[in-house]
Image (cartoon, rainbow, N blue to C red):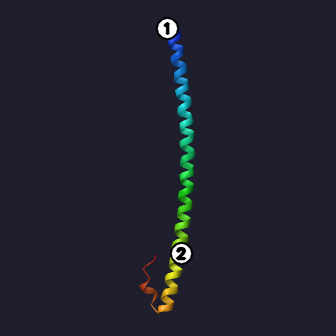
Amino acid sequence: MVFDATSQEIIWIKQDSAQIRNAVVLLEKEKDNLRQAVRKLKLENARVKQKMKRMQETINGLSGASAETDNIK
């Protein structure tokens, strides 16, 4: 009886361990996906900032404003 209970607990521990390993793998994949998304957002943010800067320079050129009043960085 003790052997059966012990072997059953060992089976449960192995199953729990497998589930934990699977969860870790899924979390690592999700972490990689989030890192990739952050990189894409940073690139898009840089492109938008550059576009805003060009637009502000065009506006300043059309209005005759100096570059010193440009607040976009």
Toward the top, the furthest residue is 1
Question: Disc 1 and disc 2: Cα gap in Å?
Answer: 71 Å
| Amino acid type assigned to the residue bearing label 1 in the image | Val
Q: Does the CB distance between marks 1 and 2 fall below 8 Å?
A: no
Residue positioned 45% across, 90% down in the render: 66
Residue 3 placement (x, y as % from top left):
52, 9
> In the rendered image, which residue does mark 2 sit on?
50
Crowdedness near tag 2: few (<14), some (14–19) or many (≥20) residues, C-alpha within 10 Å? some
> In the rendered image, which residue does mark 1 sit on?
2
Task: Say which of 47 and 73 sits in front.
Answer: 47
Residue positioned 53% across, 58% down in the render: 38
User: Regarding mark 1 in the picture, which secondary structure is present there?
Assistant: helix
Residue 23 placement (x, y as % from top left):
54, 37
Residue positioned 56% across, 34% down in the render: 21
Q: Is residue 18 above or below residue 40?
A: above
Residue 44 placement (x, y as % from top left):
55, 66
Residue positioned 55% across, 59% down in the render: 39
Toward the bottom, the furthest residue is 64
Q: Which of the two labelled residues, at mark 1 and mark 2, occupies the earlier sequence position?
A: 1
